[in-house]
Amino acid sequence: MKTSKSLALLSTTAAVLALTACGGGGGDAVATTTPTTPAATTISVSGMVKFMTDIMGLTSDTTSPNDISTTELAVDETSEPASI
């Protein structure tokens, strides 16, 4: 067991040293073209509002809302009644 741990430590250390010695590759070539500036991204508020109203229009809202009592939410249904 001790041999396998020391072997794992040795191989990990060797791998780390090998990777840190890597200069990144690519040589000394310098880029000949300059990068272009990307176009600015704009968000249309009216387009977003139209999208949201279209989504709301796809759903049917024909049911009545459920009446949820806060007491029912606080009581665990699986618990036994406490004696008073």
Image: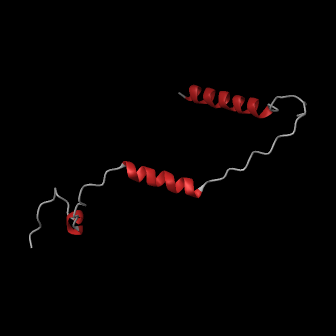
Which of the 4 quarters of the picture holds residue 72?
bottom left
Front position in the image: 9 or 51: 51
* Drawn side of residue 14 relative to residue 58, left or right: right
Question: Residue most toward the left?
Answer: 83
Q: In this rendering, is residue 38 above or below 61?
A: above
* Drawn side of residue 43 relative to residue 30, left or right: left
* Drawn side of residue 58 relative to residue 82, left or right: right
Q: In this rendering, is residue 3 above or below 70?
A: above
Front position in the image: 9 or 55: 55
Q: Residue at 15% of width from left, 59% of height from top?
A: 79
Relative image position of residue 19 (x, y in whole percent) = 74, 31
Relative image position of residue 4 (x, y in whole percent) = 57, 26
Q: Which image quarter is the C terminus in?
A: bottom left
Q: Residue at 9% of width from left, 69% of height from top?
A: 83
Relative image position of residue 22 (x, y in whole percent) = 79, 31
Which of the 4 quarters of the picture holds residue 24?
top right
* Drawn side of residue 8 relative to residue 19, left or right: left
Relative image position of residue 15 (x, y in whole percent) = 70, 29
Q: Residue at 69% of width from left, 32% of height from top?
A: 13
